[in-house]
Structure formats: structure tokens, C-alpha cells
């Protein structure tokens, strides 16, 4: 019961509501009054739990990126062949989207509305995420699994660009589940990297 109570603290509830509203209406289209109304409190009461709208966005984005980073770093550091690691990284990204499409849309697209140190911190996390993919692609080229003439930067940007838009079109209620979508997307993205058309 104590764990359940922890998960249902007013702050956690506010974060859940903010995630939903930011995902539905966008960060700039959501006001503190909207959040208060959805939570069921007066706007002034929100400030007993949170000091502003950007703080909410920061917490949502930080938690989301931390999950992506931990998963990608773990995959990149294994000794599996590069194509297997890249496939797994793509599939894990799709799985994270499927687990919470709304939250992922906020994490991947609304972070741009952060300012100052909050913005800089997310830029650093995005760079770290990119570096995990670069490490896998570099290993693949050096081991001969990926084409020797592969433009590594273009390949990584193309992969991450495709992954960043998954929450825009993926539907958990669709006819194909996250596992299969991840496999199909990995097939498509890996095809341009493989040596000898493998």
C-alpha cells in the first residue's frame, strides 16, 4: 500500500496530467490553469507542489531521456555483433514509444520549449543518445558488418530521425504490435547499412 500511495502523490498526479495535456495540446497550448482544472484544484494550489510549467516539462523530459539513455548505453556496450545491437536499440526505442506514446511525444518533441540550463541539459542527453548509436555504427563499419563506404553521420542521423517520428504514427491499438513494428523498422533501417547487401 505504501508503494501505491507513493505513486499516487499529488506531484505524481500533476506530472501525469501535465504529460497528457502536453501530449494532446502541446506545451505552449497548455496553461497552468488547464493543468489545475484537469487535476481538480485551484490554479494557485498547484504551486504548493510545483513551481511552474517549465519544471513539469523538465521532469517529464528528463525522466524520459534517462530511460532512453540507459537502454542505449547498455546495448552499445555489449559484445554482440553491431547489426544485432543496432536492431535491439531500434526495437527498444519502439517499445518505449509503445509503453507511453503520449509521454514519448513530449520527450522527443516538446523539449525544445525548455530554456537556459534545462535546455542545455537535454541537448547533452540527446548527444549522449546519439553517441551510443554512433558507437554501434562505428563498430559495424570497423568489423566489416556494415559497408566500408557508409557515411556514419548520415546513417545515425537517418536512424534517429526515423525513430524520433515513431510516436507520430505508431498506434498501440493498431493491427501490428510494437515488437513486429520494431522488427520491420529495423529491417528497413539496417538494409542501408549492411555490407554486401546483407
Image (tube, grey):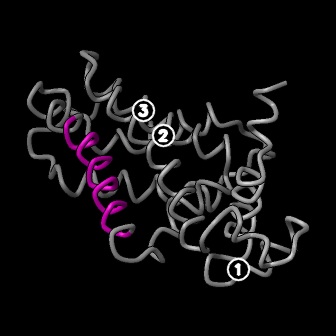
Tell me if 141 is positioned left or right of 108 in this view: left
Residue with the mark numbered 1: 30
Q: Earlier in the sequence, mark 3 or mark 1?
A: 1
Q: Is residue 121 magenta?
A: yes
The answer to which quarter of the image holds residue 134 is: top left
Badge 1 crowding class, 10 Å Cα cut-off, few under 14, some 14 to 19, many 20 or more, is: some
Q: Which residues are magenta?
A: 119-135
Badge 2 crowding class, 10 Å Cα cut-off, few under 14, some 14 to 19, many 20 or more, is: few
Residue with the mark numbered 3: 71
The residue under the point 43% across, 28% down is: 88
Q: Position of residue 44 (x, y in %)?
A: 77, 78
Check the picture and name the quadrant holding the C terminus.
top left
Magenta stretch: helix, strand or loop mostly: helix
Circles 2 and 3, Cβ within 8 Å, touching? The answer is yes
Residue with the mark numbered 2: 67
87, above or below 130, in the image:
above
Badge 3 crowding class, 10 Å Cα cut-off, few under 14, some 14 to 19, many 20 or more, is: some
Tell me if 147 is positioned left or right of 6 in this view: left
Q: Of tags 3 and 1, which is closer to the observer?
A: 1
- Residues 122 and 137: in front is 122
Circles 2 and 1, Cβ within 8 Å, touching? The answer is no
The residue under the point 50% across, 34% down is: 92
The residue under the point 86% across, 69% down is: 38
Amino acid at each position: 500500500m505504501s508503494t501505491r500511495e507513493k505513486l499516487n502523490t499529488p506531484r505524481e498526479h500533476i506530472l501525469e496530467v501535465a504529460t497528457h495535456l502536453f501530449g494532446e495540446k502541446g506545451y505552449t497550448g497548455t496553461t497552468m490553469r488547464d493543468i489545475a482544472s484537469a487535476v481538480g484544484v485551484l490554479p494557485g494550489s498547484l504551486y504548493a507542489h510545483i513551481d511552474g510549467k517549465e519544471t513539469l516539462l523538465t521532469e517529464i523530459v528528463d525522466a524520459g531521456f534517462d530511460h532512453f539513455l540507459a537502454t542505449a548505453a547498455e546495448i552499445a556496450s555489449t559484445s554482440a555483433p553491431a547489426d544485432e545491437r543496432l536492431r535491439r536499440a531500434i526495437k527498444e526505442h519502439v517499445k518505449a514509444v509503445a509503453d507511453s506514446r503520449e509521454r514519448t511525444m513530449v520527450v522527443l518533441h516538446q523539449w525544445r520549449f525548455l530554456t537556459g540550463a534545462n535546455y542545455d541539459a537535454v541537448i547533452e542527453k540527446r548527444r549522449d543518445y546519439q553517441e551510443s548509436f554512433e558507437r554501434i555504427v562505428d563498430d559495424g563499419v570497423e568489423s566489416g558488418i556494415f559497408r566500408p563506404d557508409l557515411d556514419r553521420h548520415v546513417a545515425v542521423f537517418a536512424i534517429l530521425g526515423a525513430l524520433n517520428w515513431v510516436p507520430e504514427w505508431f498506434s498501440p491499438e493498431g493491427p501490428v504490435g510494437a515488437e513486429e513494428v520494431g522488427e520491420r523498422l529495423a529491417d528497413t533501417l539496417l538494409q542501408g547499412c549492411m555490407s554486401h547487401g546483407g
